[in-house]
Image (tube, helix red, strand yellow):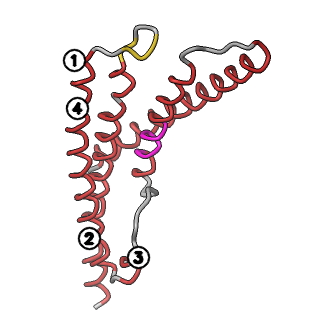
Amino acid sequence: MKLIRILSDWLAKIESAFLISLLTAMILIAFLQVILRNFFQSSILWGDTLLRHLVLWVGFIGASLATREDRHIKIDVLSRFLPRRLKIIVQIITHLFASVVCYFLFQASLTFIGFEKEGGSVLFANIPTWIFQSILVIGFGLIGFRFLLRAFEEASQLGSADGKEAAQL
């Protein structure tokens, strides 16, 4: 479990650095587009297309980091009223379910990327579209991994919750 945690921490550092790089690139390209359009009646032809795809990358990487920190969007109305042990069990089931959903989305995005490769479409500058859309596969894989890791962490808390409850009796 400790090795997985180290891997997760290392992956989070890479994701954070990549996220900062993408956001910086997006700001610079958008700023350059505004300057070129307003002062030179010109623009980078592929700039808007690139920005749209970078938004997708930022969204998926940000979602992976949010899942790691358990700060993703969730509905937990009932869990507020559950006892600690039952709450942990519900969280384990929820995280496992989310991981399974991510696995199926991962599989579907692999199929989608395969079709894009087959189609041979080009986004700009002879760069294939599937390269930019590969974040779907990467993103769902990362998020699914994070949910699975959260389920294991919750399961380890379940063991410690049993010990605490027994000590209180």
Label 1 vs 3, first from the N-terminus = 3
Q: Which residue is mark 3?
A: 77
Residue 158: mark in rendering: 2
Magenta: main secondary structure: helix
Q: Residues within 10 Å of mark 4 (few under 14, many from 20)?
A: some
Q: CA distance from mark 1 to mark 4?
A: 12 Å
Occupied quadrant, residue 14: top left
Label 2 vs 3, first from the N-terminus = 3
Q: Residue at x 57, y 20 (%)?
A: 47
Q: Tags 4 and 3 in contact by the CB under 8 Å rule?
A: no
Q: Which residue is mark 4?
A: 110
What kind of residue is marked 3? Val
x, y percent for residue 55: 50, 35
Q: Residue at x 25, y 43 (%)?
A: 105
Does residue 108 appear left or right of residue 153 in this picture? left
x, y percent for residue 38: 77, 21
Residue 84 shown in magenta? no
Q: Helix, strand or loop at disc 1?
A: helix
Seen as rendered, the residue at the extreme top is 126
What kind of residue is marked 1? Glu
Q: CA distance from mark 2 to mark 1?
A: 47 Å
Label 4 vs 2, first from the N-terminus = 4
Q: Nearer the viewer, mark 2 or mark 1?
A: 1
Q: Helix, strand or loop at disc 4?
A: helix
Residues rendered magenta in the picture: 58-64
Q: Helix, strand or loop at disc 3?
A: loop
Q: Which residue is mark 1?
A: 118
